Image (tube, helix red, strand yellow):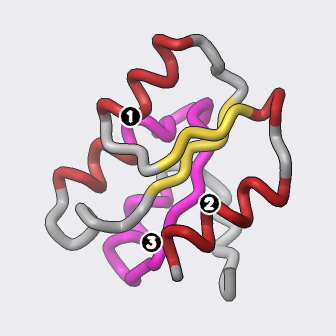
């Protein structure tokens, strides 16, 4: 939680991932160019980022959506309709120590 990269374009995430290391990534599933599922899948396929926890935060709450998030390798899947900041902070703490 020390740095917010404030990426102007979701596709820029791949560029930043190539330039830095991260303890954790929080991403929305519904991003226009590179959605959170694709980002997670690409991270899992890259040995440099395969073990970085990815927390997906989304409005997509069907069981199929959640299943897809887990299938691509999300460490946690948080639905916005039941969003609780304390829950997000607990999830982040769990993955970052």
In contact (CB < 8 Å): disc 3 and disc 2: no
Residue toward you, 27 or 14: 27
Q: In this view, does 22 lie above or below 84?
A: below
Quarter of the image that includes the N terminus:
bottom right
The crowd level at tag 1 (other Cα within 10 Å; few <14, some 14-19, many 20+) is: some
Q: Is residue 8 above or below residue 1?
A: above
Q: Nearer the viewer, mark 3 or mark 2?
A: 2
- Please name the residue shown 38% across and 70% down the image: 17
Whole-angstrom CA distance, mark 1 to mark 2, is: 15 Å
User: Which residue in the structure is indicated by mark 3?
Assistant: 16
- Please name the residue shown 36% across and 67% down the image: 52
Q: Does the magenta stretch include residue 13?
A: yes
Q: Quadrant of residue 62?
A: top right
- Please name the residue shown 56% across and 44% down the image: 56
Please provide percent x and percent y for residue 6: 70, 67
Please provide percent x and percent y for residue 53: 42, 62
Highlighted magenta segment, given as a residue range: 12-39
Which label was assigned to residue 91?
A: 2
């Amino acid at each position: 939680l020390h740095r917010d990269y404030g990426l102007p374009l979701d596709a820029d995430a791949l560029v930043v991932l190539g330039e830095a290391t991260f303890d954790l990534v929080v991403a929305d599933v519904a991003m226009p160019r590179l959605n959170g599922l694709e980002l997670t899948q690409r991270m899992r396929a890259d040995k440099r980022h395969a073990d970085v926890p990815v927390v997906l935060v989304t409005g997509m709450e069907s069981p199929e959506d959640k299943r897809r998030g887990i299938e691509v390798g999300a460490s946690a899947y948080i639905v916005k309709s039941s969003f609780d900041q304390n829950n997000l902070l607990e999830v982040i703490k769990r993955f970052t120590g």
